[in-house]
Amino acid sequence: MTHTLRARTPSLRAEAPPSDKADSPWRISLRILGKNRAAMLALGVLILISLSALFAAQISPYDPNEVDILNQLQGPSAEHLLGTDLYGRDILSRIFWGGRVTLVVGLMSVGIAATFGILLGLISGFYGGVVDSVIMRFIDILLAFPRILLALTIVGMLGTGLFNVMLAVGIASITGYARLVRGTVLSAKEETYVEAARVIGCPDRRILGKHLLPNVIGPVIVLATLDVAAAILAASSLSFLGLGVQPPTAEWGYMLNEGRNYLRTAPWITFFPGMAIAVSVLCINMLGDGLRDALDPRLKL
Amino acid sequence: MVRYIQRRLLIMIPVLWGVATLVFLFMYLLPGDPASAILAQSGGKAKNLAALREQLGLDQPLGTQYLTFLRNAVRGDFGDSIFLHRPVIDILLENLPASVELAVAGMAVAVVIGLSAGILAALKHNQWLDRLCMVLAITGVSMPNFWLALLFMYAISAVAMRWNITLLPVTGQGDLKHLILPAVVLGFGASGSLARLVRSSMLEVLQQEYMVTAKAKGLRRAALVLRHALPNALIPVITMIGLTFGALLGGTVIIETVFSRQGLGRTIVDAIVWKDLPIVQAAVLLTAVMYMLVNLLVDISYAIIDPRIRYE
């Protein structure tokens, strides 16, 4: 990245606090993100949620699968802060443990989608020609299906369970990354530095990995962040329909499904897991928005 | 213009074929033998296995199965449902209107809320109304629609218990009253992203020089917004409406289940749970075709509105 980029600074960058030494664009972006109070608050909450999921075993007051029929359908109280469900299981503990499942599903599906999507996009954009046509037709075919329907069908065929949900949601999300990366590579590969690298005999995979990939990574980070939110919603929707993570594993979407029949008598079974999903997704979206503003693509390339 | 439409239709054909092929191949994702997997789901007996295999055409070589599937699909013949013992196409056509009704109603809600919120937010940029609209928008995008549905259901039943009035029916279908709640829940989620896009698009358009010129000409605020800003701002929004329709189609799956409405989405979920393959294949294919058609219409209207596109 050359210094001339800083000369073209629009408003956001002009607000970034000045510094003596030359700043990498990444550091400038981080500073802009830091000034975004909403995004920082969201990040804080997300860290809290992640920590509570990681340390679920330590902080849960009860075993999430401990059945206690005598105490079923109790409202929030001193012993059970968020109440109990149909089987007398403590909801607070189930929410902590459910956070683990949610985190894993969100991150892993995006990992799968991003890996394959970026790969396809890089190859398609860089080589062009027949390879590009074939890959893009395949992406078009995937795009013909609404995302959740595709995930639903894949899970329906492969079977339920955590791994299949991750796979299904991941596959249904590939198209976004593929198109984004392809578009960026198409414009980036005309740049002089790519030509220069080719001229000195740089092998293709090195050009792709060392020169093109870092330029593409900014928008991909934004997409990935927002995609984690979408993946969490998709996975919990699948679980809500009974086609996702299976009982007795605590999972927020499934807990909502369990609470449906007791909505009038025990609304807390439905309310708190749904709140957990909504807050998590909201924070991820706010963080993603902040990242998008900080990594403003108008300033790169 | 006509050539543009012809070109788009021509491109659609290989994609349609690819979609049909993918739908056909879904069956082979089932672990092991499809027929056994289906029977295992329903607790069937072994002696039905051969009959099921014949019904699904699994006793034929793969190539023949594929060609038969394509040939029948084009004619709208997807065989009979394994568990309902009726032609699949009849089941789909029965359930289709309810889902289309829901999706269209949801789209109407999404467009009304999204457009109003987005335009308001853009006009009152950086004031409290802008922030409020954007908070609502991001909440709409973040909230799981099944949770929102359940919250509404709880609120209505709480009001009914306390004051003995049922504000809106919560399950069932048939008339407008039953459509309101599902449509609002469905549309609210989609309205969020629409509102954000409308806002940013309007903001960009409002800064253009032709807006300054129009204002200098002495046009009233309303004319400025409606005749100059809005048509230009809506161009990227139209593409999003196509995508939104896909999200709504997917959303009907959840909404129909939560509100106990009979429709295509619910049929798909039930068929997937029971592994009633002929229904799954046909329904997924039908949904994909509808989605492609909507996107085609969106592209065509995009070309009509923005003449620059036609001459590419």
Image (cartoon, coloured by chain):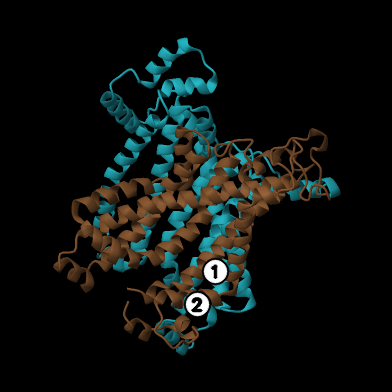
Chain colours: A brown, B cyan
Label number found at residue A237: none
The image shows residue B236, relative to residue B291, as above or below, that is below
Element type at mark 1: helix
Tell me the kind of residue under disc 1.
Gly
* Residue B242: % across, % down: 43, 55
Crowdedness of circle 2 by 10 Å Cα count: few (<14), some, many (20+)? some
Label 2 chain ID: A
Q: Secondary structure at mark 2?
A: helix
Give the answer, above or below, for where A249 lies relative to B221.
above
Point out residue A263 in the picture as x, y percentages from the top left corner.
74, 43
In this picture, residue B291 sits left or right of residue A87: left
Left or right: where does residue B20 sit relative to residue B135?
left
Q: Is residue B70 above or below residue A270?
A: above
Res. B17 image quadrant: top left
- Label 1 is found on which chain of the structure? B
Q: Residue furthest top?
A: B47
Location of mark 1 (residue): B118
Which residue occupies the foreground of this view, A295 or B21?
A295
- Circle 2 is placed at which residue position? A31
Of B68 and B29, the residue lying toward us: B29
Which quadrant would the C terminus of chain A be assigned to in this image? bottom left
Check whether the beta carbons of the residues at disc 2 and disc 1 lie within 8 A of each other: no
**Quadrant occupied by the N terminus of chain A:** bottom left
Where is residue A273 shown, x and y percent of the image?
67, 49
